[in-house]
Image (cartoon, rainbow, N blue to C red):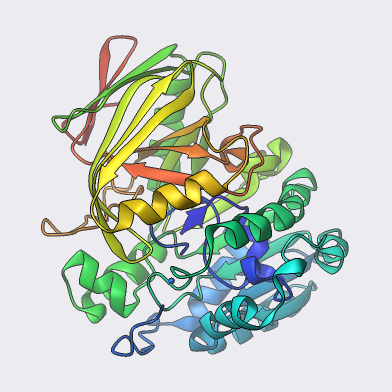
Amino acid sequence: MNRVLPIALFLIATSILLSCEQAGPTANLGESSVTPAASESPKVVPASDLEALSNRLITDVAGVKEGDIVFINGGARDLELLENLATDSRKAGAFPLLTLSSDRMARMYFEEVPEKYDSQSPELDLRLATIPTVSISIDSNEAEGLLADVSPARLAATGAAAAPVGNLYLKRNVRQVAVGNGLYPTVWRAKRFGITQEELAKSFWTAVNTDYSALQTTGERVRAALSAGKELHITNSNGTDLKVRIEGRPFFVSDGIISAEDVKKGGPAVSVYLPAGEVYCAPVAGTAEGKVVVSRDFYAGQELTDLTLTFVAGKLTSINGSGPGFPKLKAQYDATGAGKELFAFVDFGINPNFRTPAASRLGNWIQSGTVTVGIGNNTWAGGDNKISYGVTAYLPGSSVTLDGKPAVQNGVLKL
């Protein structure tokens, strides 16, 4: 999942950015961008009990109650689950609105809609954003690198135009639930993990259906420890060596439940990403110093190696890398406006029940002991950078000290 734009953007099918998964930290460097391969035809591998899952999402996770207005969005492959969500919302006395997204619609926008409309203010989307109290989205993206051949300028323009919609959701404290989190069991993602789609589906739905009570306990412990600290120092054998200050910054926990306490806090506290298991913050602005190295990832469906991000006073001063994916990443970075260069967030994985395969070529932030950082948008993490762009850097096997004491050691959580 890409968390660069808030989850709410999935819900409005009138804008291209709402039709493809590209918003909130970016799940993988290449997930937001795409040309579908003919061999990667959609295949539905459903959860074991869609009725129970729907009931849980409505009742336990989102806390839907009488009078709520619930926006629900996803793709045709999950139509039965979407129908269940709409029905369960109504059973709770809420009022559901169901919309569909698809890769085809995302492609058609850039193929058929005149470029002059990319920067057009999304008036309908903005009006709709004043309505919901809850939004639930199921990742609908099927193809890796769906918009890989679209001009970086067009992607930047559509992102900038759509950004106010997501910002309005955050301002209104809409309770947001996103199912996917960079792990939805598509054909291409299973290949990247080095397992079958059925194996990934089993791991994914097991993680989505996990008992989140233990995660809540772990999340609160980790949040409390980090909140009491002043500085993080992240190192990795690949050359990563970064310091950033966190003193006084709020930490948020995605533990699978939007609690009454979360509702009181509002903003990022009422957003949940499933499968859950993260503690994150937007650090003190202007304090990131050092270097972040991503040994291997993918961007726009193409391999990216040795991506190196150098920071001085919280700003990216150089970006280098190799592999066929790097020129595309650099072109998109260059085409994006001010704010793209700002260090955005630090994210700690706390879920002990999900492990990426040893041969995996992808990372994911929920795995316990995983450290993830990024640049660009950080409103989802409690920051104020509203730009509709971001780059996420997974740092598996890293070590982190909190004021000189071990917080993560070689990929093992110590808090």
Q: Residue at x 38, y 59 (%)?
A: 30
Horizontal arrangement in the rendering, residue 114 relative to residue 344 (left or right) = right
Q: Residue at x 81, y 63 (%)?
A: 122
Q: Residue at x 66, y 83 (%)?
A: 112
Q: Position of residue 241 (x, y in %)?
A: 26, 22
User: Is residue 340 something that shows in the picture?
Assistant: yes
User: Is residue 257 something that shows in the picture?
Assistant: no
Number of marks: 0
| Quadrant in the picture for residue 54 | bottom right
Horizontal arrangement in the rendering, residue 66 relative to residue 39 (left or right) = right
Q: Position of residue 17 (x, y in %)?
A: 63, 66
Q: Position of residue 175 (x, y in %)?
A: 68, 54
Between 125 and 281, which is closer to the camera in this rendering? 125
Q: Residue at x 32, y 85 (%)?
A: 40
Horizontal arrangement in the rendering, residue 80 relative to residue 362 (left or right) = right
Q: Position of residue 18 (x, y in %)?
A: 64, 68
| Vertical comparison of 358 with 50: above or below | above
| Vertical comparison of 200 with 374: above or below | below
| Quadrant in the picture for residue 408 | top left
Between 415 and 128, which is closer to the camera in this rendering? 128
| Vertical comparison of 243 with 69: above or below | above
For the C terminus, the quadrant is top left
